[in-house]
Each structure stands twice: as structure tokens, then as C-alpha cells.
């Protein structure tokens, strides 16, 4: 126990490839002394990722591991695994980390690897989710936080946020509204994990001791 009666903080490691607005939301949330985890490092596969500056600005150690320096996916993932494990994280958070991961990597972090994806999974795994939701004439779109398994953008859903699609929405306007919701849900999931309220059970996500038949749901404006 730390002074003040708080148990020790969980160690969070964040992987990014881009601008890092979800990373920023996590940095902001973990600034709260009461947050049960702290970000021990941020690793990017792209040296130019804007999120690296966000981390440095917050005093968080950063590392870059450029996937183009590796001959194949397996060797990159092995090197990444070694870098991650040097920080002994309790939780690895994918925050716009745009890499397909090898089975070996995913299995190694089973139950302690989460991702956020900008769609109401299982709809629209992969890229261009906003464009696809508009083209399909969907009434709503959203984002999903899920445990990562070997399936691309798959794995048991934890929390989904739903946003209505408006008549004049473009890919850009819809993406912006979904992203704002991502920033609200991801820190909550990370908090629950760090509090020990969220575990990946044998067949389902277990939240507060109850297996989830489907991801928890949150609509815009709900807390
Ligand atoms: C977010 O919209 C995230 O959901 C998405 O990349 C964006 C990263 O933005 N992730 C995926 O598409 C994963 N398949 P950010 O760098 O500003 O957090």
C-alpha cells in the first residue's frame, strides 16, 4: 500500500502509430491522483507519430520501433514484445496502433491487451469504418473497446459508444464525433481494468464478477 491507503498503481503501456488523441485522453485521466494506473511508457512504430510529443510533454518515456527496419511481421513483433516486457506492464493499450499483430504476440498478452476501434463491432473491422457506415445508410455508428484476440479488430467487446448518423454527416464530421466519444470511453475501461473490475474470462468478458453477454453500452452524453 502507498501512503494514503491506495494500493499500488497498475502499470500501463500504450502503443500508438499516429496523432495520439486517445493517448491524450488517457494521459489526462491518469493525471488524477486517484486513477489506479499510470502510463509507464509509450511506444510507436512510426518515428513521426504526433502522439510521441504528447507523451514527452507529459514526462512519459517514449520509444520508437520502426517496423520498416524489420524483415517481417514475426521479427518486428518479437522485438516489440521484448521492448514492452522490459517495462513489466499490467496492461497494454492499443491507441491507434495500426499494425496487424501475430498470433504469438496476441497470445503472449492474453487478457491484458485492449484496443479501441471506430465502429460498432462486429460491424466494419479494418479501415475506413466511417465511410462504410455512411455508404451502408446506417442510422448509427460508434466505437468499441475490446480485448484483443487473434481475429483482426475482433475479440470480446467491453464497452461500446453509439452516435447517431446525422443527415448531413460526412466521413470527416462523423469521424470527429466518434473520436470525441472514444476519448470518453477508453479511460473508463482502462480504469476498470486497473481496479480489477474487468477480466477476460474463459468465454466472456467478466465485469464486476458478471460475464457480459454483449459489450456494455453507452449513448452520447451518458456517463
Ligand atoms: C482512433 O479513431 C482509433 O479508434 C483508430 O485509430 C484512431 C487513432 O486516433 N484505431 C483503429 O482504427 C484500430 N483498428 P488517435 O491516434 O488520435 O488516438
Image (cartoon, rainbow, N blue to C red):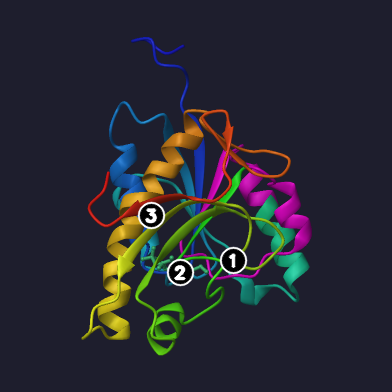
At a point 68% along the width and 52% down the height, the residue shown is 81
Task: Determine the image quadrant of residue 187.
Answer: top left
Could you tell me which secondary element the residue under label 2 belongs to? loop
At a point 47% along the width and 21% down the height, the residue shown is 8
Image quadrant occupied by the C terminus: top left
**Sequence-first disc among 3 and 1:** 3
Query: Pointer 2: what residue?
Result: 119
Q: Quadrant of ligand 1?
A: bottom left
At a point 44% along the width and 47% down the height, the residue shown is 61
Query: Pointer 1: what residue?
Result: 153
**Sequence-first disc among 2 and 3:** 3
**Front-most of 33 and 214?**
214
Task: Determine the image quadrant of residue 87.
Answer: top right
Q: What x and y, as percent, mark residue 6?
A: 40, 16
Nearer the camera: disc 2 or disc 1 = 2
Q: What x and y, as percent, mark residue 21?
A: 33, 61
Marks 3 and 1, how far apart in space? Answer: 18 Å
Res. 23 mark: 3
Nearer the camera: disc 2 or disc 3 = 2
Q: Up-down: is 107 above or below 29? A: below
**Sequence-first disc among 2 and 1:** 2
Q: Is mark 3 within 8 Å of ligand 1?
A: yes
Marks 2 and 1, how far apart in space? Answer: 10 Å
Q: In this picture, which residue range is highlighted in magenta?
A: 82-111
Marks 2 and 3, how far apart in space? Answer: 18 Å
Q: Is mark 1 within 8 Å of ligand 1?
A: yes
At a point 61% along the width and 43% down the height, the residue shown is 112
User: How many neighbours does mark 3 have within 10 angstroms: few (below 14), some (14-19), or many (20 or more)?
Assistant: many
Amino acid at each position: 500500500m502507498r501512503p494514503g491507503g491506495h494500493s499500488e498503481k497498475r502499470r500501463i503501456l500504450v502503443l500508438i502509430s499516429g496523432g495520439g488523441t486517445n493517448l491524450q485522453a488517457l494521459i489526462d485521466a491518469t493525471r488524477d491522483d486517484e486513477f489506479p494506473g499510470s502510463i509507464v511508457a509509450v511506444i510507436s512504430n512510426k518515428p513521426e507519430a504526433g502522439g510521441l510529443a504528447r507523451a514527452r510533454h507529459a514526462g512519459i518515456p517514449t520509444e520508437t520501433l520502426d517496423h520498416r527496419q524489420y524483415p517481417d511481421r514475426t521479427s518486428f513483433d518479437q522485438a516489440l514484445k521484448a521492448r514492452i516486457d522490459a517495462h513489466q506492464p499490467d496492461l497494454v493499450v492499443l491507441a491507434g496502433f495500426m499494425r496487424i499483430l501475430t498470433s504469438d504476440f496476441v497470445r503472449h498478452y492474453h487478457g491484458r491487451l485492449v484496443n479501441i476501434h471506430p465502429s460498432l463491432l462486429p460491424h466494419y473491422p479494418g479501415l475506413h469504418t466511417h465511410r462504410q457506415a455512411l455508404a451502408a445508410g446506417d442510422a448509427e455508428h460508434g466505437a468499441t473497446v475490446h480485448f484483443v484476440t487473434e481475429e483482426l479488430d475482433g475479440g470480446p467487446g467491453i464497452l461500446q459508444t453509439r452516435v447517431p448518423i446525422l443527415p448531413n454527416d460526412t466521413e470527416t464530421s462523423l469521424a470527429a464525433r466518434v473520436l470525441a466519444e472514444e476519448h470518453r470511453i477508453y479511460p473508463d475501461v482502462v480504469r476498470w481494468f486497473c481496479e480489477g473490475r474487468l477480466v477476460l474470462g474463459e468465454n466472456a468478458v467478466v465485469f464486476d464478477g458478471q460475464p457480459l453477454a454483449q459489450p456494455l453500452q453507452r449513448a452520447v452524453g451518458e456517463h
